[in-house]
Amino acid sequence: MNQQGFEMGLLDGLAGQVLGSMLGGGQQQAGGNQLIEIVLNLIKNQPGGLGGLLQQFQNAGLGGAAASWVGSGPNEPVSGQDMSSALGDDFIGNISNQLGVQKEEAAGSLAAILPQLIDQLTPQGNVPDRDAMSGSLIDLAGKLLRG
């Protein structure tokens, strides 16, 4: 198994545990693994990586919230509508189709998990470059295992 496959496997295995507490478990937990995968693919495939994703939030007027996810203080919450504004209705629609839920539920779930994942990927308050992202994903998996 290659490094990326190992990372995704670890994160998929941990997603249910993490999302069970974040999103209420049960039925949503099954979609949680998919949501983690979608979010990680979003970060990985985003032009500019995590920095590019954060720039989308800046462009949508949510720079303060996005900065709080990277910073060391508490994460500023965002709404599902904020997610739709920053990422686009088409992207949210694609997630809702993949998860088999309404757009509002997909956006709300994304609003619950994306700030947490970005916070975990930026423990020192710095956005890792693409080369460091693999290490950050492994570190995230380690933190979740301890939790």
Image: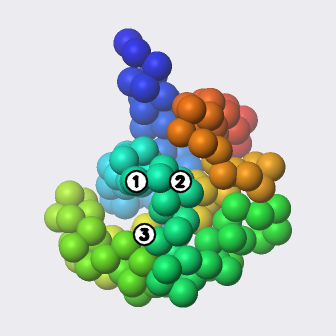
State left or right for residue 126 relative to residue 38: right
Which quarter of the image is occupied by the N terminus?
top left
Q: Nearer the viewer, mark 3 or mark 1?
A: 1
* Picture quadrant of residue 105: bottom left
Mark nearer the N terminus (2 vs 3): 2
Q: Secondary structure at mark 2?
A: helix
- In this rendered view, identify the residue nearer to me: 12 or 2: 2
**Badge number at residue 47:** 1
For label 2, the crowd category at 10 Å Cα-Cα, with few meaning under 14, some 14 to 19 and many 20 or more, is many
Structural crowding at the residue carrying mark 3, measured as other residues with C-alpha within 10 Å and reported as few (<14), some (14–19) or many (≥20): many
Q: Is residue 65 above or below residue 43?
A: below
For the residues marked 2 and 3, what is the alpha-carbon distance in whole angstroms? 19 Å
- Of 135 and 27, nearer the camera is 135
Residue bearing mark 2: 50
Please report the residue visible at 40 percent of the width from the left and 15 percent of the height from the top: 2
**Residue on which disc 3 sits:** 109
At horizontal 55% and vertical 65% (from top left) the residue drawn is 54
Q: Name the residue: 26% across, 63% down.
A: 95
Outermost residue, top direction? 1
- Residue 99 in the image: x percent, y percent? 24, 60
**Tag 3: amino acid:** Ser
| Image location (x, y in percent) of residue 78 | 55, 81
What colour scheme governs how the chains and residues are painted in the rendered image of this protein? rainbow
Query: Mark 3 or mark 1, which has the lower sequence index?
Result: 1
Amino acid found under the numbered disc labelled 1:
Pro
Camera-nearest label, 1 or 2: 1
What residue is shown at x 26% (from left), y 79% (from top)?
89
Tag 1's secondary structure?
loop
**Image spot of residue 52 (x, y percent):** 49, 60
Q: Residues within 10 Å of mark 1 (few under 14, many from 20)?
A: few
Image position, residue 27 (x, y; %): 34, 59
